Image: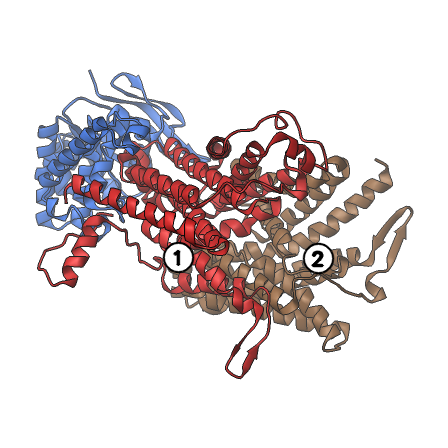
Chain colours: A blue, B brown, C red
Amino acid sequence: MELLNIDNITMKFGGLTAVSNFKLKIAPGELIGLIGPNGAGKTTVFNMITGIYTPTINKIYFQDQDITGIKPDKIAKVGIARTFQNIRLMENLTVIDNVMIGFHLHLKSNLASAILKFPTYVREEESIYHKSMELLEKVELEKFKLEKAGSLPYGQQRKLEIVRALATGPKLLLLDEPAAGMNPQETKELMNFIQKIQDDFGLSIFLIEHDMKVVMGICRRILVMDYGITIAEGNPAEIQNNPEVIKAYLGVDANYA
Amino acid sequence: MSLNLFLQNVANGLSLGSLYALIAIGYTMVYGILRLINFAHGEIFMLAPYFLYFGVLIFHLPWWASIIVAIALTATTGMLSERIAYKPLRDAPRISVLISAIGVSFFLQNLAIVVFSGIPKAVHRPEFFTRLYRFGEIRIQSTLFASIIVSSIFLTLLLYVVYRTKTGLAMRAISTDIETSRLMAVDVDKTISITFIVGSALAAVGGILWGLRFPQLFPTMGMIPGLKAFIAAVVGGIGNIPGAMLGGLILGMSEILFVAFLPALSGYRDAFVFLILILILLFKPDGILGKKIQEKV
Amino acid sequence: MKKQNEKILTILALIVLGILVYLAENNLDAYKLRILNLGAIYVTLAVSLNLIYGFTGQFSLGHAGFMAIGAYVTSLLVLPPYYKEMIYILEPLAWPFTVIHTPFIVALFLGGLFAAIAAFIIGLPVLRLKGDYLGIATLGFAEIIRIIANNIPQVTNGALGIKGIPEFTNLWWSVGVAVVTIYIIKGLIESSYGRALMAIRENEIAAEVIGVNLTYHKVMSFTISAFFAGVAGGLFACLLTTIDPKAFMFVMTFNILIVVVMGGLGSITGTVLAAFLFNFFLEFLRPIEAGFNIGPIKIPQVPGMRMVTFSALLLVIILFKQKGLLGGFEFSWKGFFQFINKLFGNKKSSEGSVR
């Protein structure tokens, strides 16, 4: 059974076609990369999966359920989480609060029991706290739990955003340029981290990246987009030698081994 | 309704609409540049007729001189309010500037109460302004013509300035992107001041025409017309100058015709205008001539 | 600090508060009591506005409208039927208002409930708007409510308003309601739902993607906020004993907004202090209007100087102290004892406050 089935979707904004006939099937446990020049439509694909945009044509299925056009909060409930290209943390809230919010969507206690602090709610809140601390420990951010999220250095903000996404308990994690702005050391740590969380949490991961070390290093399968069209699909070796891909990135025919 | 009555109402609607248009332009220009709803604009509108009448009654200036002085004083007040209350908050969250604008609005209102007294003033107008012209059965006050003619002149002048001069180009640049404009050597502070001066001057013209037409002045007289003019700007497309003119006319007409066709509901006339606002915001927030700005996700 | 100890301290503080209220009620004159009552009512108004604005980040300018609904509903329920018949001179009072008569607490609750219902209906479409647009739209609704009140004399007695409302509000009621308001809103803010509200304030798109249902949470916050505004309206009516549509113009919302800004958005402690300070100041400034002497200089009587000063004050605060007078500080027992410790030179390490 495939986890995610993107069935030939197209996204038009008025007269502009941002994405054209995009199709992809992701199986459980896969790590798939999406690359392409800026403006190729990659984030638009993510936005369609997560319900921020509704595809103009055709549908998206998750675990055989039609999720096309469902609002983002329901997408999260269904099991898809994402991070953003330009980090979207709750900057004035503490680090730990940012993670604890990720658990809110699975809260069983109703509003009244939360306000009046019934024992069932208090127990849930404690459980959320502990689980959030565990996640913070995984990225070595537990010391900063009471710091404002906006005060963290860039690289740690990225890690926090990933951990917040993990809090929602997803089966599929979408990462939008997670390595952006990282130095080689941080990038290496990130690569290990991504593979680790994939094993620990049994996730499928779909990531957009410009850093080729990351993509070629950890992705089993890669898709390449340019001007909204998928121009290539394959494993790292195939993609690196694909003339269309080279042309899209460099604009000339070149041999790039 | 007889044709004559209908035409009378249309004339009234145009007159009221042109006044709203003059005020609405100030709102839309400021919003276009600073993304700020200048709550104090209604008070600017209110100050002009007060300055006018005080000029005539206390300083015994001839009418034409007093009009010029009133416009100049009002424009200065507008420019000063920007320098003192909005400029320091340019990098602050937008809500802070909004609250500051509300603060200026109430400050000016209460200052007017203190200086001019809260008792409505009925002012004597020279005959020139009260002459009635007759067209068949319809009676039209000279101020109605004045409103439409004067508004049209000023609006045309404004369009010329905005679309055909360097200053206007600077204004349009700033409304798109302040930082980049600065990098392009646009004097942002000066251009913003000019925007406020022009917007306030137009509101002053509107205020004076209003004061000549309804010669009962009171310090809170700017609130409701100010709010309605803002609604007109939204209807036409906030940030869009021709939109403000169009919105003003549409709103003025709608208001007059509402009362004309549903006289039993005339107490709800302001509520009707607010309802238009809410409907526009819900269904076509960009207004008639506005364009959608997408937030990048 | 253990939760047990915190609870005990809070209960002790409430007992002290109760004693203070008892002493005040029995010793202070009517003038001072009125100011204290207004202060407490403003606490309820400002804390509830802070919920939707400071915590959820939705710029609502409609508070006066919900207050008005609460004030009118409470008044209609609390006045005896024969009296209502007397004062409705524009048009006879409509049924069933002619026969309904309820105890004060029921009237207050229903006032809040009707305000909440109105908020629910208005909120569903309007809360989709953002920032200034939401502000203007909610302002529009508040004005519509007021205009309706002016135009349905068979229910509200139109522009004449309702007079002779029994003076049920005393410090026990106003402070009591304020305490309940703070308890519930604090309880909400310190829960997972509160985190969700603040997430919406910080970054709406991210909040939605994290699984927070925007519509549910925004409308919930708006409705609860309006409920307490309505109850405050009822208290207000039974304190001033007369209400009319002019009492609920935008100035009222503006006053509450001043309190919220003065106290700091998102700070309940600050709001409480600001609410009382605001009312004290307003009274304190009254002599300015009557005219007074500074030495040989005679300053003449100037009505309206109060509000001029006040608006200027708001501008000063907004321009120089954007985080409010207390800078976002929130009271906590832990923080209080750390402060005491520091004063007496103990070397206890302190953790910052959580929010």
Amino acid type of the residue tagged 2 in the rendering: Ser
Q: Residues within 10 Å of mark 1 (few under 14, many from 20)?
A: many
Q: Nearer the viewer, mark 1 or mark 2?
A: 1
Taking the image as drawn, is residue C172 in sight?
Answer: yes
Q: Residue at x 54, y 39 (%)?
A: C71
Describe residue C305's horizontal placement relative to residue A93 as left or right: right
Does B114 sit above or below residue C275? Answer: below
* Helix, strand or loop at mark 1: helix
Taking the image as drawn, is residue B239 in sight?
Answer: no
Q: Where in the figure is residue B137, as x and y percent of width and height? A: 90, 46
Q: Residue at x 16, y 45 (%)?
A: A145
Dot 1: chain letter: C
Q: Where in the figure is residue C8, as x and y percent of width and height? A: 21, 42
- Quadrant holding the N terminus of chain C: top left
Cα separation, mark 1 vs mark 2, equals 44 Å
Q: Which residue is mark 2?
A: B152
* Helix, strand or loop at mark 2: helix
Q: Where in the figure is residue C249, as x and y percent of width and height? A: 57, 48
- Asked whether C51 or C164 is in front, the reply is C164
